[in-house]
Structure formats: C-alpha cells, structure tokens
Image: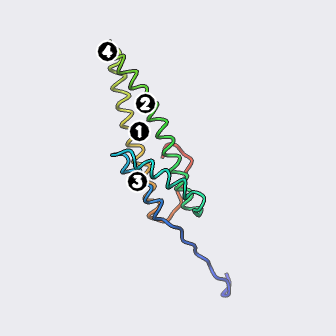
Amino acid sequence: MSQTETTIVTTEDRVLPAVVYGLYLLGLVNGLTILVGLVVAYINLDKAGPRMRSHYDFQIRTFWIGLAIFLSLGLLIGISAVLSLVLIGIPFLMLFLFLWGAVGVWFAVRCIIGLVYVSQDQAYPRPNTWLI
C-alpha cells in the first residue's frame, strides 16, 4: 500500500444485536421478550452491515429452530402425559421433559456464544448451522 492510499475502517452497530441476544436470554424466563427480540432482528436485518447481518441471521434461525423443536417436544410431552395414565408413557415423559430442558440450554448457549462474537466485533462464523 502506498502512502497516498488510505484504509477505510467501517464500524457497525453492535448494540442492537447484543440487545437481541439479551432479550432472547431474558425470554427464557418470561417468554415474551424472545418475540420482541425476533421483531428487532427482522427489522434491522436489511439495514445491517455484513458482520452484524450474520448475527441477525443467526438470531432469526435460532428462534425458528428452537420454536420447531420446542413445539414438537411439547406435543410429545402431551402424548406421553396421556400415556402415563396407563404407565407406559412415564419413561417417554421423563425423556421428553429432559430434552425440553436441553433445548433451553441449547438456546442459551447459542445466545451466549453470539454475544461473545458481538463483543469482539466479529461476524458469527456459521450463522446457518443448527447446532452451535
């Protein structure tokens, strides 16, 4: 690079992606703020630069994957609860309740890892994955 060339460093707003992660984590307790976080992520998706867009994509994907798994397990828990009246559903009920809790842990871990990347001003490296 010659002396006349200048490097342009752009900064992106890191606050709103961090707020969405915070709303998601708070939503594990009350449920409502997850929806608020999802709306904020959708509103800011098109306005974000490439680094923060990866976080919004990751947050939106985290919500929809989590919701699908959560609802599926909720249905299985309901069926197992009915079957537990004849005792056959008790092991399944316990398994599905454990998995339901594991989904909450998965959701929290994804949010915490995302917060780490946002705090380091880095794009989320794999926003389209379902695991972590």
Q: Residues within 10 Å of mark 2 (few under 14, many from 20)?
A: many
The residue where tag 3 is placed is 23
Please tell me which of labels 1 and 3 falls first in the chain.
3
Q: Are marks 2 and 1 in contact (CB under 8 Å)?
A: yes
Q: Secondary structure at mark 1?
A: helix
Please tell me which of labels 2 and 4 falls first in the chain.
2
CA separation in Å, label 2 and label 4: 19 Å
Q: Residues within 10 Å of mark 1 (few under 14, many from 20)?
A: some
Q: Residue visible at 36% across and 18% down?
A: 82
* Residue mark closest to the camera, 2 vs 1: 2
Compared with 80, 45 (above or below) is below
The residue where tag 2 is placed is 73
Q: Secondary structure at mark 3?
A: helix
Q: Is residue 123 left or right of residue 101?
A: right
Q: Amino acid at mark 3?
A: Leu
The residue where tag 1 is placed is 103
Q: Amino acid at mark 4?
A: Leu
Q: Is residue 5 left or right of residue 79?
A: right
The residue where tag 4 is placed is 85
Q: Secondary structure at mark 4?
A: helix
